[in-house]
Amino acid sequence: MAVQPDKRPKQAQDEAAGTNVTERFRHGNYWLGALAMLPNPVSYTIRRDGSALYQGDVWYDHTRRWTTTRGGVDHWDVGPLECLTWWANAR
């Protein structure tokens, strides 16, 4: 007997598998998203309300600091929210 394809909507499939992106931190219109299945992510995508595209990244680097980059400038901080705040204000 053949395996039947999953006929649920893509969003329902992602939520069931934990592969949907959830909001973790917010600063104004910008927010950090990570996969729902990761309880303590080491990287986030920067997203903006109303846009499906990601704007940038925040990650925990090999020097044990949270890092982000905007306009070719690297920034290190104590946490992902602080990096997002700097990134949003560095326009």
Image (tube, rainbow, N blue to C red):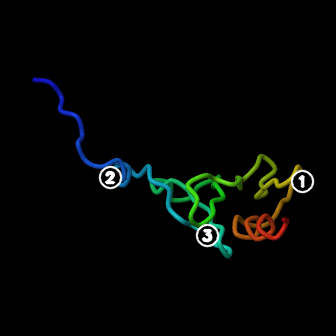
Q: CA distance from mark 1 to mark 2?
A: 38 Å
**Residue 25, labelled with which disc?**
3
Instruction: Kindly report the distance in space between the C-alpha atoms of the residues bearing marks 1 and 3.
Output: 22 Å
Identity of the residue drawn at 81% across and 53% down:
69
Specify few, some or many for label 1: CA neighbours under 10 Å numbering under 14, 14-19, or 20 or more: few
Q: Please give the residue where the numbered disc 1 appears in the rendered image.
A: 73
- Find numbered disc 2 in the image and state the secondary structure of the residue it sits on: helix
The amino acid sitting under disc 3 is Phe
Circles 1 and 3 in contact, beta carbons < 8 Å: no
Q: Is residue 51 above or below residue 14?
A: below
Q: Which residue is depicted at the point 78% across and 56% down?
A: 68
Q: Residue at x 50, y 56 (%)?
A: 21
Q: In the image shown, does 55 or 25 lie closer to the viewer?
A: 55
Rendered image: mark on residue 58: none
Residue 90 position in % (x across, y down): 85, 66
Mark 1 or mark 2: name the one nearer the start of the chain.
Answer: 2
Dot 2 or dot 3, earlier in sequence: 2
The kind of residue tagged 2 is: Ala
- Marks 2/3: CA–CA distance: 22 Å
- As drawn, the label of residue 16 is 2
Query: Would you place residue 48 above or below residue 60 in this image?
Result: below
At label 1, which amino acid type do we have?
Val
